[in-house]
Amino acid sequence: MYKIAVIPGDGTGPEVVDEALKVLYAAALKKGFEVETTNYDFGGDRYLATGEIISEEDIEELRGYDAILLGAVGHPDVAPGILEKGLLLKLRFTLDQYINLRPVILYPGVECPLADKQPEDVDFMVVRENTEGLYSGMGGVNYRGTSREVATQIMCNTRQGVERCIRYAFELTRKRGKKNMLTLCAKTNVLTYAHDLWWRTFNEVGEADYPDIKRDYAHVDAICMWMVKNPEYFDVIVTCNMFGDIITDLGAIIQGGMGVAAGGNINPEGVSMFEPIGGSAPKYTGKGVINPVAGVAAMAMMLDELGEKSAAEDVENAIVAVTTTKMESMNAGRMGHSTSEIGDLIVEALG
């Protein structure tokens, strides 16, 4: 029995989550495990009605679940940053979800915007440090609104935070068993304090404990260039919070768009949270045209993290079957089927 907390969220989030749960229940039935889900109304509507986003008591309750499945965060009537910081970042930091894991996988049948690139060319993972860096909230503003205004945002990196992220990435590279190459994405020529810590830790840990893994390095600007030019080069990339945020959105586009990009906020020793990356897409709310594949893929990541690896593989195979033969496009409103019909097709392919 797995207890799953479900946060449908804003906009099209509930529609995507409905299809992910539909596939989850089918996978549980097929594989013989049980799932108990509980919905939480955290999001823009609750904030507008009550002024509250999420309480400390709510977070303590979430600690009692095996995993969290999130739909989307972002409401057109709530100023940018309020929900993102008050819900997403608060959950990541408080639950110590220190890894943001983003597979960049081009499914068969999905059009890649890069000329001549096939599924075998776009198949790598990005491990993003998820609780430090520029997102830690350190900094402030003095003399606001005057000509003397000073604004600072501190890139906070600790040896503990950097090392546990790098070790996770080395372990993932070894587990994948593909190119056995881990690329550090940083900016050591400019960020000579913060990213020197990343560089030294990367090499010390790799040399001492992972001699079987090839260590590779590239500046973040070069990474962006090579992800477009030669995505087939990469196996696993490890990087800091801000750079990870940027390059994974680039990765989502080269894998076919936000409608197929999934991610996990991982605490290997605690409760992890899984989500589609595309956001709430409020203009499509309630129209039944949003692509649910990313939500289903995020749920498959959740199954894998819970140890139901066979079920996760079956869901991934079902997604591939549908993207290859059933969908006309990955874009909202152009799929050839409604949101719920895509979920039904994935269940059917799951067998």
Image (spheres, rainbow, N blue to C red):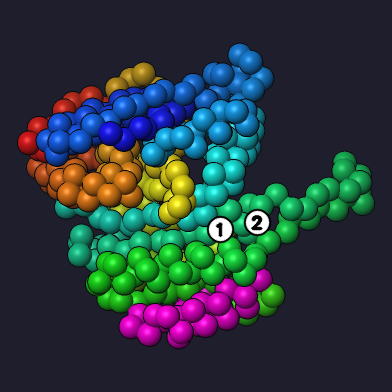
Image position of 161 with respect to 201: above or below: above
Mark 1 lies on residue: 241
Q: Is 240 situated above or below 222?
A: above
- Tags 1 and 2 in contact by the CB under 8 Å rule? yes
Which image quadrant is residue 215 in? bottom left
- Residue 8 shown left or right of residue 59 in the figure: left
Judge the density around disc 1: few (<14), some (14-19), many (≥20) Cα neighbours within 10 Å. many
State the residue lying farthest toward the top.
Answer: 49
Per the image, the residue denoted by label 2 is: 134
Check the image and name the residue furthest to the left: 351
Left or right of 136 in this view: 262: left
Can residue 23 be seen here? The reply is no
Give me the residue at 85% from left, 53% from top: 150
Q: Amino acid at mark 1?
A: Asn
User: In the displayed structure, does residue 212 sit left or right of residue 190?
Assistant: left
The local secondary structure at tag 2 comes to loop
Q: Position of residue 280 (x, y in %)?
A: 45, 31
Q: Position of residue 292 (x, y in %)?
A: 29, 34
Q: Which residues are magenta?
A: 194-223
Q: CA distance from mark 1 to mark 2?
A: 7 Å
